[in-house]
Amino acid sequence: MGLSLDALERVVAGNKIYARKATEQDPQFFKTLATGQSPEILWIGCADSRVPETTVCNCQPGDIFVHRNIANCLHADDLSASSVVEYATTHLKVKRIVVCGHTKCGGANAALGDADLGPTLNTWLLPLRELRRKHKGELESLADDDAKAVRLAELNVQQSLDVLRKHPTVSKAINERGLTLHGMIFDIAAGELRVLDQAKKGNGLWTAPQ
Amino acid sequence: MASQDVAKYLKESHDRIFENNREWAAEQKAKDPEFFTKLSAGQEPDYLWIGCSDSRIPAEQITGLGAGEVFIHRNIANLVCNTDLNVMSVVNYAVRHLKVKHIIVCGHYGCGGVKAALTPQDMGLLNPWLRNIRDVYRLHENELDAIADESKRYDRLVELNVVEQCRNIIKTAAVQQSYATNGFPIVHGWVFGFQDGLLKDLKVDHEKMLRDIQKIYNLTQG
């Protein structure tokens, strides 16, 4: 069985500590939260446990509206992500949308290989494998698997930004109220976020920090 | 605001994210110089969290869990729709590859998605997504309509929605087969309350729910 109930008790205890601390620091904290949300940022990131957006951005509850899925993919026909984008753009009127990939991404790694991942994941990762095919030459020229995976993650972020730009409500908000889109890579080994546009300046490759 | 002021303001909020991130990274390194090296080696989370996109409920912060401990999917109103490839990929990967021990569906009172679904109104692109919550309402119409107080009815729909999504997770082949072989994952339904910041356990009985659905949805037989 190998199932430990402690894992669950830990979360329940953790939540009690969180609630107590937050109330100690600001007795009105939860009352204020309950009145509503007005986040400035929509974050589309990977489900990977190592990239919790609010924590790595040192932000507070209420700051970032979030969608996370396997390998931060945005497909134009995905109703889940489209609904998140629609709600964030039209109703919450976020000012910026971040698509954040990361190093050591299991989804990117899997897409670089040819293993049968089962019907569900094969289908979900098909666009990533398509990207790999399109950029075969460039990916093969890279030194190691980690570099290939990061480059694929980066290409995937760019593709997701393209999908976003074509979303009707997003393109309207870009033109009418200056909504901006941003691609990022979270470098797990450094704990740091990198803006994709800056990385593009050199040879188009994302590079590890010096 | 003039357009250059808007641009300046946006630049500042953008820069703030990076400043904050550097502060956080420095803090972690100060606490444990090997923190990111270990993190970089891989993830072995015990939990899959399926929560709402709502900015006020960052799963890791409200549970006191650190980076690397909880695999997270968040969408509008924490739905697990049977034909949604997005959530099904997350469940599949978490159960079959990461072998998570617990799956937590966490809703919250005051959920905008549930509220929108309770309001009969054309929401455009959001209609098909919200229809799933309206379906939960229809499934429990008698119970909900018997609640006179509107805000209590709304709270109850939040809870029933979580329970229904737990059921949807248990319907998956990944969960049924892993549970039959390994005895995990176990599915839990929780609701976060803004009044006190605490999680309420809806006491979803995983074993019973599984038994009840398997007459129709049993996927454990190869």
Image (cartoon, coloured by chain):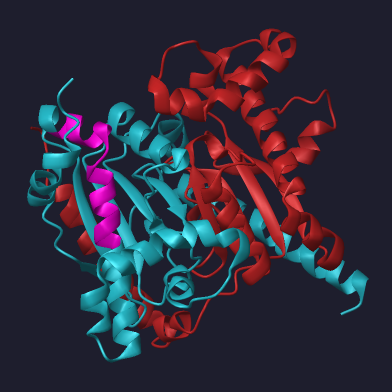
Residue situated in front as seen by the camera: B175 or A35: B175
**Measuring 29% from the left and 91% from the top, which residue is drawn there?**
B149
Question: Looking at this view, is B174 or A67 the one in front?
Answer: B174
**From what the image shows, is residue B45 above or below residue A208?**
below
- The residue lying at 60 percent from left, 43 percent from top is A192
Q: Which chain is red?
A: A
- Residue B184: x %, y % from top left: 16, 37
Chain shaded cyan: B
> Would you say residue B20 sits in the magenta stretch?
no
Q: Is residue A95 left or right of residue B222?
A: right
Viewer-proximal residue, B211 or B50? B211
- The range drawn in magenta is B162-179
Q: Look at 34% across and 64% down and name the residue there.
A: B107
As drawn, which residue projects farthest toward the bottom? B149
Question: Please, is residue B109 above or below residue B211 in the view?
Answer: below
Image quadrant assignment for residue B190: bottom left
Q: Is residue B164 magenta?
A: yes
Q: Which image quarter is the C terminus of chain B in? A: top left
Task: Where is residue A161? Give x, y as percent.
Answer: 72, 42
At horizontal 39% and vertical 57% (from top left) the residue drawn is: B78
Whole-percent x, y for residue A121 in the image: 44, 27
| Residue A15 visible in the picture | no
Left or right of A83? Residue B5 is right
| Quadrant housing residue B169 | top left
- Viewed as shown, does residue A53 lie left or right of B200? right
Q: Is residue B193 left or right of residue A126?
A: left
Question: Quadrant of residue B47 in the image?
Answer: top left
Prevalent SS, magenta region = helix
On the question of residue B52 being in view, the answer is yes
